[in-house]
Image: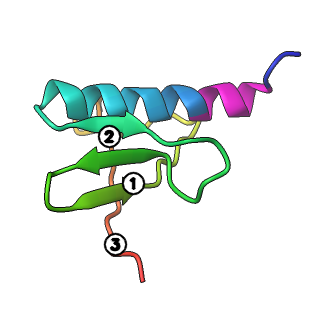
């Protein structure tokens, strides 16, 4: 069974975020499928849940620089 292109892009985004967090020194893990969040960060005294959103349209900033755009908010 093959995954849809949108689902593949979403999973790639989750893996990219998790990789980048680990590379920066965070203790990050992919969450189980079906949960309302995609990545977990374990900071010892606290666990942070991250929901990753991806898109297929390439964004540029300034002179053709690829960018990541983040929107942060606290969960209730």
- Rounded to the nearest angstrom, the CA distance separating label 3 from label 1 is 10 Å
| Left or right placement of residue 44 versus residue 2 in this view | left
Q: Which residue is mark 2?
A: 68
In the image, 42 versus 55, the foreground residue is 42
Callout count: 3
Point out the residue furthest to the top here.
1
The C terminus, quarter of image: bottom left
Q: Nearer the viewer, residue 69 or 4?
A: 4
Tell me which label, 2 or 3, sits earlier in the chain: 2
Residue at 38% over, 57% down: 49
Percent of width and height locating residue 33? 64, 42
Seen in the picture, residue 43 relative to 15 is either above or below; the reply is below
Q: In the drawing, what numbered circle is on residue 50?
A: 1
Dot 3 or dot 1, earlier in sequence: 1
Quadrant in the rendering for residue 28: top left
Q: Position of residue 23 (x, y in %)?
A: 17, 24
55 or 16: nearer the viewer: 16
Residue 70 — which label? none
Give the CA distance from mark 1 to mark 2. Answer: 15 Å
Per the image, label 2 sits on a secondary structure element best described as loop
Foreground label between 2 and 3: 3
The residue positioned 14% from the left and 52% from the top of the image is 44
| Residue underneath mark 3 | 73
Residue located 80% across and 27% down the image: 4
């Amino acid at each position: 069974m093959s995954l849809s292109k949108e689902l593949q892009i979403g999973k790639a985004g989750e893996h990219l975020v998790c990789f980048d967090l680990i590379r920066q020194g965070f203790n990050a893990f992919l969450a189980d499928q079906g949960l309302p969040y995609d990545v977990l960060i374990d900071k010892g005294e606290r666990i942070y849940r991250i929901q990753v959103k991806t898109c297929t349209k390439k964004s540029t900033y300034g002179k053709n620089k690829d960018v990541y755009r983040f929107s942060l908010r606290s969960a209730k």
